[in-house]
Image: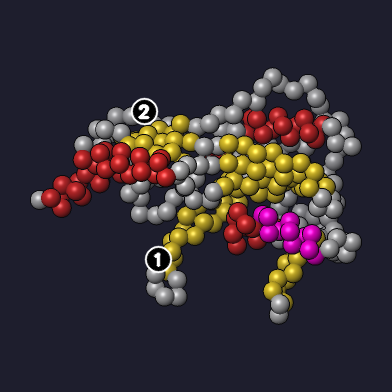
Amino acid sequence: MRILFLLLAILALNSCASRYSLNKLEAGPQSSQKITKKFKIAYIGFNTFKSTKHKNPEGKVEFEAVAEQDSRTLREPIGGSYPIPGENKPNGLRKDISQEKVMGFARSYLSVTGPTGIKELEKFLEIAKGPEGYSYSLRNLPYDYYIVGLHSPVFEKPRNAAYGFLSVFSSLLSVVTIGILPSYEAYEANTLVRIYDKNLNLLKEFEYDNDYSVWRALWIPPNPKECGIGSLTCLGMFSPVVRTNPSIVFEAGSAKMSADLNDYIANLK
């Protein structure tokens, strides 16, 4: 009987509606600066991720984050575009840029995305595996600037230990009350935007705080609407997979990000 009650309680909790409370960054007054100079700007990243499950060689289940190439949170790149594979045929490799600099550029990106970010980088870099490891070379492409967007952490991460305890405690209370008392979760999220010149010199960094929280209960109004009762995409802590941060978390700051990029690009020489 106890096992049946527990199963029903967990089922009820996972059937709860979810309400995301997002950090909507204020963009401030609309900038009067206009981009008058025409630059060739390539945008890299700004992806979110999905969680996949697989078994390692030892037979243990592991979760891996895979970049969703079509889920760009900055949907309208300012003054540039997201190049597609093969869009620009490279004119050889940039021999004037050291492999150490290109490697640093690649590693700063892959340190967040993991191996799933290689596909994105291969549009701009030639990556070769040799006897002593990987080598990186910048393709000779017609871009003046590269703008890189990184969302982290990839998987949900409580803001601190206290919030982690609160999430577990409130979720257990919600289970006991079959979803009448709400559960509460608070997660860390941030966006780092880096602007490089054509020689991979770092010109500017912008950082954005995207921390968010989630309330879950049977009676709570969902936000977004697809997180209503019974949604399988917005499960709580009893989800059968390790969850990644959803795209809406980072999209909430896109207006501020666009304004900052517009002002910076408008002053480029």
Mark 2, residue position: 221
Judge depth for marks 2 and 1 and give the one in front.
1
Residue 157, percent from left and from top? 47, 47
As helix, strand or loop, the secondary structure at mark 1 comes to strand
**In-image side of 147 versus 143 (left or right):** left
Q: In which quarter of the image is residue 141?
A: bottom right
Circle 2: residue type: Pro
Q: Residues within 10 Å of mark 1 (few under 14, many from 20)?
A: few
List the single residue furthest toward the bottom.
Answer: 131
User: What is the spatial separation of the Cα atoms under label 2 and label 1, in whole angstroms?
Assistant: 35 Å
Residue positioned 54% across, 48% down in the render: 153
Query: Residue 227, labelled with which disc?
Result: none
Residue 220, percent from left and from top? 33, 29
Q: Quadrant of the C terminus?
A: top right
Residue positioned 58% across, 41% down in the render: 190
Q: How many marks?
A: 2
Q: Quadrant of residue 185?
A: top left
**In-image side of 49 versus 40 (left or right):** left
Circle 1: residue type: Val
Is 226 rendered above or below residue 147?
above
List the single residue furthest toward the left.
Answer: 1
- The residue stretch that appears in magenta: 99-109
Q: Residue 72, can we see it?
A: no
**In-image side of 102 versus 165 (left or right):** right
Query: Residue 61, labelled with which disc?
Result: 1
Tell me if residue 105 is in the magenta stretch: yes
